[in-house]
Amino acid sequence: MDSRTGLPVVGMVGGGQLARMTHQAAIALGQSLRVLALAPDDGAALVAADVQYGDHTDLAALRTFAKGCDVVTFDHEHVPNEHIRALTDEGVKLFPPAEALVHAQDKRVMRERLGELGAPNPAWCPVESPADLIAFGEETGWPVVLKAARGGYDGRGVWMVDDAGQAGELAATLLAGGTPLLVEERVALRRELAVQVARSPFGQVAAYPVVETVQRDGICVEVLAPAPDLPEEQAVAAQQLAIDLATALGVVGLLAVELFDTPSGLVVNELAMRPHNSGHWTIEGARTSQFEQHLRAVLDYPMGDTSLTAPVVVMANVLGGEPGGMSIDERLHHLFADEPGAKVHLYGKQVRPGRKIGHVTVLGNDLDDVRARAARAARRLQEGQ
Ligand SMILES: Nc1ncnc2c1ncn2[C@@H]1O[C@H](COP(=O)(O)OP(=O)(O)O)[C@@H](O)[C@H]1O
Ligand SMILES: [Mg+2]
């Protein structure tokens, strides 16, 4: 509790753009997010006043950080689960709880649990040896999708495997390096969807509209809200699935369910329990942003209105372009001149090719128009043209 304001102190482990944008939402609630960052140039460390430095894998650093926080939450899933358990046993309030978060930390644990809960999984199996992977490929048909069970993001940790030869070599190398693996059938997906819900300790849940996420090279580049041409009953079923999962897993805070839209229905890809790239559109596009909603949920406040503020909302990620050419400042100038309605979010990151450095959001009435405007705005920042 902040004795000056009488308002709670939320600590977030991790100082990336998710913490940066959560801090923005905290400000409106009269708070100032406390951040555990790795370095002073982390996106959130650049803007928050209450920053501590330390490694999220260091139990002592986490313990020091948690002192004086009413609740601790996360901007990524890389805090060791046993540290979360240890701190919980010491009386620290951490959300989502360790027992829930493990399903976003370990894709094998997630697949097993989804199976038990009757949620739609692709065919999959754990890979303990190259022979496991080859047998799976021979049985389900190549190509297959090999995944690191832990630690991957933005497609790092996901490999398309075309045949037994490639499978044997890759699995041997990864297993020798100590990477726990699983393999999934390559799903014949028409497109990718995502649905977010927030759940409070009280048990209140609030679902956002289902969105379409467009990926390139394993990275989300565009989000369309609401998902175009999704039959109402499928949208409701996806929201219900996310609500049921949040409740069954005991999630507190946000849950993002990444889905594959296939000819035979929706299949779960993966779960995330934090603000998510598929929800950045909510800052302007929903009555309550995902960042505010996450804070409300972990603080056990009532949930905010999740409805859309416009018929169509499109978010486009801005990736770092090749060095040289126009400065970012000059690019922004052109973007604003070209598209006064675009909302720009830059994360304060140094530009590196392919790195997510920001996003833009455009609201409107016509999907093709809004999508083209968002893409053009992102391109102006990314490529300067
Ligand atoms: N079983 C699968 N079949 C087809 N494509 C897949 C499969 N699993 C993952 N992908 C593709 O790879 C992307 C990244 O996979 P994901 O498991 O979400 O990893 P990450 O943790 O890096 O986001 C997905 O968004 C999808 O485009
Ligand atoms: Mg993913």
Image: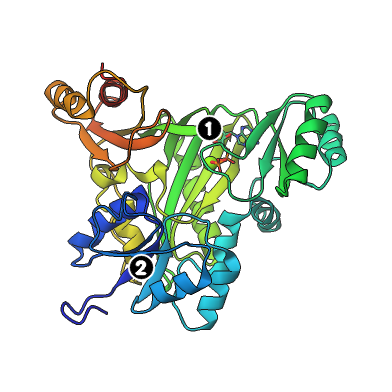
* Disc 1: which residue: 218
Q: Secondary structure at mark 2?
A: strand
Q: Nearer the viewer, residue 104 or 17?
A: 17
View quadrant of ligand 1: top right
Marks 1 and 2: which is nearer the front? Answer: 2
Q: Residue at x 70, y 58 (%)?
A: 116
Q: How many marks?
A: 2
Determine whether the beta carbon of the residue marked 1 sits less than 8 angstroms from the nearest atom of ligand 1.
Answer: yes
Distance in Å between CA atoms under marks 1 and 2: 30 Å
Left or right: where does residue 8 sit relative to residue 176? left
* Disc 2: which residue: 11
Quadrant in the picture for residue 266: top right
Q: Is residue 350 above or below residue 229?
A: below
Q: Residue at x 51, y 78 (%)?
A: 88
Q: Nearer the viewer, residue 54 or 116?
A: 54
The spot of residue 205 in percent (x, y) is 41, 62
Q: Residue at x 33, y 59 (%)?
A: 293
